[in-house]
Image: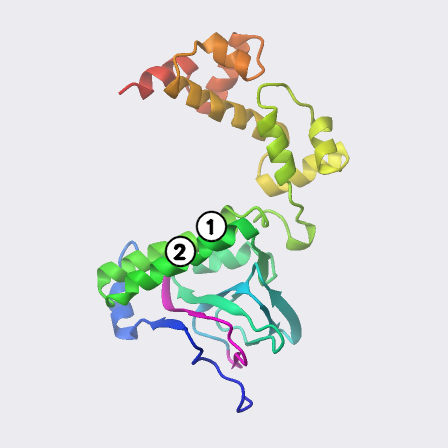
Amino acid sequence: MNRTEKSEGFQGQVQYVIPRPVLSSTAQHILVSGLYPTDIGCYPQARQHYRQREQGAEQNILIVCMSGQGWFEIDGRRKPLRRNQALLVPRDKPHAYGASQRDPWTIQWVHFTGEDAAYYLTLLRGGFTLNIHPDLTPKIDQLFGEVYEALASGFSQQNIICAAQIVRHILGTLFFNNKAFSPNTKAARFRNLENVLRFMKKNINTTLTISEMAEQAGLSPPHFSRLFSQQAGVPPMEYFIHMKIQRACRFLTLTPLSIKEISSRLGYSDQYYFSRIFHKVMGIPPATYRRNQSG
């Protein structure tokens, strides 16, 4: 490491290293063993930040670039890491990373391990990065802050359990509630379908065709159906039906509207057909669902 480069010691940095003896006694807890942090922190505007691990780390490493930019090198290939991107480095994987000299990054980072940790790596399908929707960045920042708050008063079992649950929430948010990433699609093939989802929601009271949805995405119907299914996990028409049934559940729970009125508001001219669709999705008829929600 060049004498001007440093692995930590940045103004305003936050860093918690959980003592290993404490971890060894807490890691077997049922709420911790699946996934838990060992080290976590924030390096703001980390000029000259550099880290190299020729043998890799004992844990998986998540780095979220909040602003600025930097780079990482894995398997002999150097790539940039920019704002609204996250890097996930597998345990025992040799690597290096550092901040840009011109525009040094601010990063939130966590070392984590546990029985479930490796699963998140499989979602990247051989890659190491994922994009983060800009709307999600404040939430990720808030969640890291909640971990710091949990650990600030000490490394009690209660605090470590709390931190472990929040780190799981961070990963769940990045991988499963992130409009810029789909765990079912390689990053290079990902396409943001947010405008199509808005189109579905806007037209929830009508009937839509695959061609109309595909037109919103600027794709051919076959390509759109294949891509949507890969990213959402279900075909587009099934997704649209689920969206309608979700709205129907709200109507049944929160309004006195009749089943006929609800079916009409959701684009079904035949209330009996609507009831069959509802039963297929929810496992019970709409009238039974309404009765079960009472009280």
Dot 2: what SS?
helix
Residue 228 position by quadrant: top right
Image location (x, y in percent) of residue 288: 37, 15
Question: Residue beneath label 2, please?
Answer: 143
The image's mark for residue 173 is 1
Looking at the picture, does residue 99 appear above or below residue 129? below
Image location (x, y in percent) of residue 94: 55, 76
Q: Amino acid at mark 2?
A: Leu
Assess whether mark 1 and mark 2 are in contact (beta carbons under 8 angstroms): yes
Q: Residues within 10 Å of mark 1 (few under 14, many from 20)?
A: some
Q: What residue sits 49% from the left and 10% below the top?
A: 261
Which quarter of the figure is the N terminus placed in? bottom right
Asked whether 48 falls inside the magenta stretch, the response is yes
Q: Earlier in the sequence, mark 2 or mark 1?
A: 2
Q: Nearer the viewer, mark 2 or mark 1?
A: 2
Structural distance between the alpha carbons of marks 2 and 1: 10 Å
Which quarter of the figure is the C terminus placed in? top left
Range shown magenta: 35-55
Dot 1: what SS?
helix
